[in-house]
Amino acid sequence: MSDFFRCRFPGLDQRDESVAAHFDALNDGLEAQVAALRAKHPGAPLVTFSHFVPRLELVPEKRFLFVPALNKAVGSRFLDARVRALGPDAHIFGHTHFSWDATLGGIRYIQPCLAYSSERRTVGAAIAAGEAFPLRGPEGPLLVCDGGAFPPRYQCCWSAFYDRHARRPDLANVLPAFVARRYRRVEGIGEVGWGDGVRPEW
């Protein structure tokens, strides 16, 4: 992945967790600041943000990805632990260009991606949310909080998919057509499809 050869971090090694640990450590002391804000504004919602993805459950399984190794460059366990320790009402994240709205462990995770203009033209369902789903990409920013209130959950491509279908890492040999066409098929090995009883909504 280009992330690993286009970026240089002197004194750190991208083959281990040192880069992720270094950048996470820049947030040390944040819990105390948040606690002070909460004491000053009791009852106010807490919304946290990151560019990267805090949990693997917020990314499609690798058999659904154009770049199967994507999960190696989208987030870290340090970010996950940091968000859980802060305990926000909602966490807004990005990086993968998949719209998402799901609640895990009492935290609402939202990715209101704007994506590239080319993606808006070609992969509308994957980036669409709310009223735009499933036919087109976003036409502007997505409302995540207004006057301390959160909007109803948005209908998003992949988070809605996982509402209906369990993750199946054991199905690494079953690829949907949009991924399978990027590879040369070896007769008798692998299948093209989604798996038994699995159908996307888009």
Image: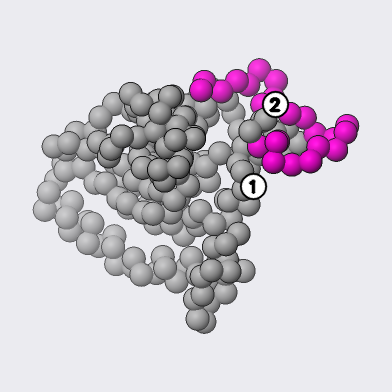
Dot 2 alpha-carbon crowd within 10 angstroms: few under 14, some 14 to 19, many 20 or more: some
Q: Return the mark for residue 76.
A: none
Q: Is residue 60 left or right of residue 155?
A: right
Give the residue furthest to the right.
Answer: 188
- Residue 98 drawn at (x, y percent): 46, 40
Give yes or no for residue 58 being in the magenta stretch: no
Residue at figure coordinates x 29%, y 60% from the top left: 31
Looking at the rendered structure, the kind of residue marked 2 is Gly
Mark linked to residue 193: 2
The N terminus is located in which quarter?
bottom right
Q: Residue furthest bottom?
A: 11
Q: Is residue 159 visible?
A: no
Query: Toward the viewer: 136 or 86?
Result: 136
User: Relative to 174, is 121 on the left or the right?
Assistant: left
Q: Main secondary structure of the magenta part?
A: loop
The residue tagged 1 is: 68
Range drawn in magenta:
179-202
Task: Give the residue drawn at x 74%, y 42%.
Answer: 183
User: Mark 1 near mark 2, Cβ–Cβ under 8 Å?
Assistant: no
Is label 2 in a helix, a strand or a loop?
loop
Which residue occupies 45% across, 32% down? 124
Q: Spot the residue most to the left.
A: 40
